[in-house]
Image (tube, grey):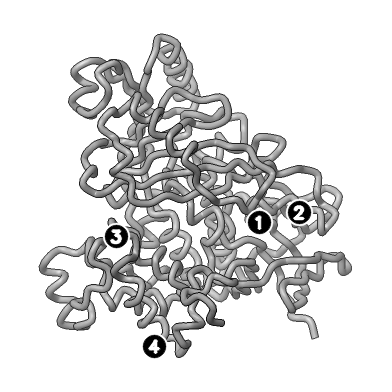
Amino acid sequence: MLQRYDIAVIGGGIVGNAIARELSRYELNVLLIEKEIEVSFGTSKANSGIIHSGIHDSPITLKGRLCLEGNVLWGKLSKELRIPFNRVGELLVARSSNDISALNRLNENAKANGIHTEFMIGNKLKEIEPNLSLTITVALLVPSAGVIPPYEMTYALYENACQNGVEYLLGSEVTAITRDGPGFVVRAGSREIKTGYVINAAGVWADKVARMAGAGSFVIKPRKGEEYLLDKRLNNINNHIIFPAPQPNSKGVLIIKTIEGSTMIGPTAEDTDDREDLTTTEAGLNNILDFVRTMVPGIDKKDIIASFAGMRPVSDTNDFIIEESRSVPHFINAAGIQSPGLTAAPAIAQMIVQILGQSSMRMEKKKGWKKYDRPHRRLTLLSNREKEAILKLNKSYGNIICRCETVSEAEVVDAINKGARTVDGVKFRTRAGMGRCQAGFCTHHVMRILSRELGIPEEKLTKRGGGSNMIEGKR
């Protein structure tokens, strides 16, 4: 017998989970389907965490409009979900006279979008970014831009959606979608699900998912971006998110002040046909280093402690595609969500609810909707007094599992209780393994705790699901 749902959301990234949480406010039976073993294991785990100001995008595009709306919504959402959000501001620098002209155009766009900006010149610029190249004397400051931890936010959305009745089917790739009256039958892994509506938030696979239902009027063109994390000793090398003047196919290579205070550089922008190529390259690294040194010369290759890559799901329209299919009613695309997709995610979720309300779906608010009530107790964010209090409640907060990021055993156990089933699942929830030694110290401790808490032999634990077993040759 087929399980029946009002809505099936396909895709467990930041957008899919934002949609799921927003739908959880209503009297609906919602299922989210994700092909990876955990949510946030696709593009969202490689996101730079920037909440964009909206200065780069035209307000007549969906990207531009939803970016502006999302930037405002994140202020409220971060408080609701107890996730840190820091409006560090973005600084767009001019490296040439042509760049100054580009900044003037961006400033005009900012005025049209109602975004506050300020030109920083000479000594004033040097005061706020002392490590900038001496050749850079003009920059445009946009204070409303900020940073969040993108994977932590995805997990918080997921947890709150679960609290409010959304079901999740993880580790199950959608392989077929067939029409069934006004609704659909979706085959995911070994299961078949009957649903009234499908919301397609499948990222780089969104065009393929749409074609399964006969709603494939667009093409996703993946664009790979490599990024590199710097050692914490360089935490003070930049105070803002530093942008160059706009580049032809991206916002350019950035110097990013992350929410943790460390610095990240990148991304590249490489169009590719391989949707699963997440390799980093020597050429990509050198291109990034050469570029960022024109803005901040003090960045050195020896300071890099981690590298990763992600795929931007660029549509052939070069804009977000958020609409109910005209040819396939009840099939709603949330596709082509490239940058500023993280920023726009809460606004996209609200737009999906509006689309459903304009369709035949009955949207009745849930009376018993629950606010997020699972606080993130990260030792690094607690005062000494708070640490003393929490240690009295749970002594395992005193057992440090990851020395680089000061992650305790209690935090690892909490991550497992919230859904972590892999080493990477613990890593993205707690930051265990993200520090200087890159998991050299903490991996075996994390594996031991995972094995103990889940009742799974260590030889069956994986890094990220699939065949990524941590102990080679064991299954």
Give the Cα distance between marks 2 and 1: 9 Å
The quarter holding residue 266 reads top left
Instruction: Give the mark toward the camera: 4 or 3.
Output: 3
Give the Cα distance between marks 1 and 3: 33 Å
Instruction: Give the mark toward the camera: 4 or 2.
Output: 4
Q: Quadrant of the C terminus?
A: bottom right
**Secondary structure under badge 2?**
helix
Give the Cα distance between marks 1 and 4: 33 Å
**Secondary structure under badge 4?**
helix
Q: Is residue 59 left or right of residue 275?
A: left
Give the Cα distance between marks 4 and 3: 24 Å
Q: Earlier in the sequence, mark 4 or mark 2?
A: 2
Residue 19 pos. (x, y %): 58, 59
The quarter holding residue 330 reads bottom right
Q: Residues within 10 Å of mark 1 (few under 14, many from 20)?
A: many
Q: Which mark is residue 208?
A: 2
Q: Earlier in the sequence, mark 2 or mark 1?
A: 1
Q: Quadrant of the N terminus?
A: bottom right
Q: Which mark is residue 437?
A: 3
Q: Earlier in the sequence, mark 1 or mark 4?
A: 1
For the residue marked with disc 2, what is the amino acid?
Lys
Q: Which mark is residue 452?
A: 4
Q: Is residue 382 left or right of residue 157?
A: left
Please determine whether, in this image, residue 328 is positioned above or below residue 417.
above
For the residue marked with disc 3, what is the amino acid?
Cys
- Residues under numbered marks 4 and 2 in contact, where contact means CB atoms less than 8 Å apart: no
Q: Which mark is residue 454?
A: none
Could one spot residue 409 in this view of the protein?
yes
**Secondary structure under badge 1?**
loop
